[in-house]
Image (spheres, rainbow, N blue to C red):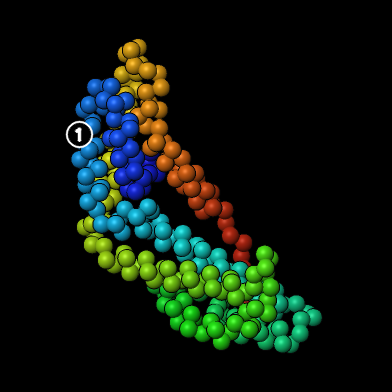
Amino acid sequence: MQNLTLSDLKLGLTDLFDKRKPALLRTSSGKTYEPMLAKKLEEISALPPVVIGGKALAAELEETDVEHDGFGKAVWYMTEAYLRHPQVSAETVAAATRIRRAFIPALSELKASYADEARAAIERKKILKQHKADLERFPAAGGETLHDWISGFLDAGERLHSMLSDRADMKEASRKGAGALRAATIGLLSRLRAGVADELEHNPKLPPDLDAQVFGYLDELHVPRAAAARVKKTKKAVPEAPAPPEIA
């Protein structure tokens, strides 16, 4: 259950103390841990919404940055293809050059800080309309054009700005306290589960599926989180191909 977010824990504990409470209280472990977990649910529910809004803010920032950089690379490589093609018209080369200079002059910009990427997106959003004709000159699969790709790029950059602002609204103590609360709650649930397993082993009167009765919803919440964590770990392990030299 180590990948559960505070939002997941709030949902899971609410469910545990509702429809799953009779199953929980069939064991001595459940009776022991029930008041402790109820207290944790109260503490989680009292946190500011920005703290328990589904994902850790750092993870959400990282995912948005990946989206931002993905759009940016797509636009850069698309324009790169036209700039390198030996038989593209001068008008098309000029349009690709204007797009490159206006929105993503160099791939190295995608390694900038979140704040710098957000600032650039806000500034470049102001000139999106004046480059619409150039952007729509370049079609992409699915009926889109570079205008759609650049819009996604800039929107992701603006979301970085919003999330950085949200992070600034959170006090450092609140962030650290939320992390400690999440870890403590997961620790209690893990020890409860171990206790239930021990009782199942030594008490034949308990139903064999009691673990599922108690932890079924928490497990359901954990599965996609664990899968996402594995995908993220795999992506980090795969080195990115080096970029081709940029055209001046």
Q: Residue drawn at (31%, 45%), measured in percent from left and top? A: 10
Left/right of residue 173 with respect to residue 242 in the rendered view = left
Specify the quadrant that holds the C terminus: bottom right
Rendered position, 218 above or below 57: above
Left or right of 196, for residue 110: right
Q: Nearer the viewer, residue 19 or 12?
A: 19
Q: What residue sits 70% from the left and 84% below the top?
A: 93
Residue 236 locus on image (x, y percent): 51, 53
In the displayed image of the protein, which residue is found farthest to the top? 204
Q: Is residue 21 above or below residue 127?
A: above
Residue under label 1, please give it: 35
Closer to us: 128 or 231 = 128
Q: Which quadrant would residue 190 be assigned to in this image?
A: top left
**Is residue 90 visible from the viewing direction of this image?**
yes
In the rendered image, the residue lying farthest to the right is: 87
Height in image: 58 above or below 136? Answer: above
Query: Which residue: 48% across, 48% down?
Result: 228
> Which quarter of the picture shows residue 246?
bottom right
Q: Amino acid at mark 1?
A: Pro
**Residue 57: x %, y % from top left:** 36, 58
State the SS at label 1. Answer: helix
**Side of 23 relative to 157 (left or right):** left
Dot 1 surroundings within 10 Å: few (below 14), some, or many (20 or more)? Answer: few
Residue 60: x %, y % from top left: 41, 58
Residue 240 x/y as whole percent:
58, 60
Does the rendering let one see residue 80? no
Dividing the picture into quadrants, the one containing residue 26 is top left
Residue at left offset 24%, top offset 37% = 37
The quarter in which the N terminus is drawn is top left
Q: Is residue 72 left or right of residue 245?
A: left
Q: How many marks?
A: 1
